[in-house]
Amino acid sequence: MSALNRALLVSEIFPPRTGGSGRWFWEVYRRLPHQDYWIAAGDGSGSEQFDWTHDLNVVRLPLSQREWGIARPGGLRAYAERIRDLRRLVKKHHITMVHCGRCLPEGVMALGLKALTGTPYGCYVHGEDVSTALHSREHTWLVRRVLNGSRFLIANSRNTANLLHRDWGVPMSRISLLHPGVDTTRFTPTPRERAVRDRLGWGDRPVILTVGRLQLRKGHDQLIRAMVQIRGRVPDALYAIAGDGEELEPLRRLVASEGLEEHVQFLGEIEDQRLIECYQQCDVFVLPNRTVGRDIEGFGMVLLEAQACGRPVIAGDSGGTAETMRVSETGLIVPCDGPDQLAHQVAELLADPDRMERMGQAGRRHVLERFDWDALAIDAAKIFSDARSGAPLPSTLTPVA
């Protein structure tokens, strides 16, 4: 890419802020030629310190908005301010293409910028973002405008691509598939270490781990309820929850009402090295996701990270989580609208160490073969190059029933 042909990623979610999409962008764009890409990232606590640790071209902007719509003055005013900021960046750094982290709100910013400057844009689509937009007539109208005006669309899973085709009428030929990945040099298996487990407060207990924002669709509540049955078969089992979010207090109340204070541990937000230790030292990783209204788990990067660390995984039968694993070989898919089947599968797996070991080893091989970031960054660069040239996008997607 020449100096006069630069791209700008616009994303509210970007490190040090936690979140799967932010990690995705960080891992891809830091592997691309830095002189060809600029990043307009959300500001927040720790941003300045984090930006001293890398050499990417990152500009911090107040991209968070209370209103994602434009019907109210506050929403329209916020978009106008962000579009003004982005217009300055585009002019200053000779930007010729914008990459949007989501349809809302970043895609609306890019749509406005295109109207003013003619700068084309493309959008990442994560699944839950376009699904939840259907709850609002205004958001639906905005997302449709963003999708129709985009030069390219990148879906994080085949499930997400199917949502775009089925619910939004986007031809599959306009969608490129780019899975999130994992840094297989950092997320690696290690032997069981008593000192690390003691530091985590686990000791010799069998540990079930979930990592992710505390949201309804993540299904933490179902696994907490399942622990009532699991501890009947595995009396000293511990459920460790890493993450924070709006469901923290409801989950704490549920733990208390079920009398599970000794069997559920809230770790909160934790830094990367400790998170990797959690993956490495847990016995089984579970993401008990389910569909809540139209809110789904688009993919599930945490399932890749756990498999990279040699851990067997279990996920809910919803969204794109099955695409992260080889079902039955590296992980299991379980309906998580209730606790019973979840409790049965978790207890069965904990009772079979040999099976857990086989699944963990197979999971590590699976991630190395299909989800290493270096290979995915090459795929991303090809999508961006084709979008700039106007060539057909590299998509082999077909509608899914």
Image (cartoon, rainbow, N blue to C red):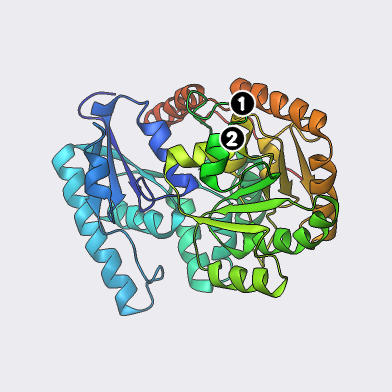
Q: In the current view of this chain or complex, which residue is farthest to the left?
A: 92
Q: Amino acid at mark 2?
A: Arg
Residue with the mark numbered 2:
194
Q: Position of residue 393 (x, y in %)?
A: 51, 31
Query: Is residue 303 depicted above or below 78 in this figure?
Result: above
Residue matched to label 1: 191
**Frontmost residue, 344 versus 64:** 344
Please, is residue 339 above or below residue 56 in the view?
Answer: below
Q: Residue at x 62, y 20 (%)?
A: 369
Q: Residue at x 83, y 40 (%)?
A: 351
- For mark 1, give the secondary structure: loop
Rendered image quadrant of residue 355: top right
Q: Quadrant of the N terminus?
A: top left
Q: Position of residue 213 (x, y in %)?
A: 53, 56
Residue 342 vs residue 120: left or right? right
Q: Position of residue 395 (x, y in %)?
A: 58, 31
Q: Nearer the viewer, residue 78 or 141?
A: 78
How many angstroms separate mark 1 from mark 2 (CA)? Answer: 10 Å
Q: Nearer the viewer, residue 229 or 333?
A: 229
Measuring from the top left, give residue 347's x and y in whole percent: 82, 47
Q: Nearer the viewer, residue 283 or 363?
A: 283
Q: Given the image, on which type of amino acid does mark 1 rest?
A: Pro
The quarter of the displayed image where residue 51 is located:
top left
Asked if residue 153 shows in the view, the reply is: no
Return the residue found at the far bottom. 72
- For the point 45% across and 64% down, the residue is 142
Helix, strand or loop at label 2? It is helix
Left or right placement of residue 356 versus residue 102 in this view? right
Residue 121 relative to residue 44: left or right: right
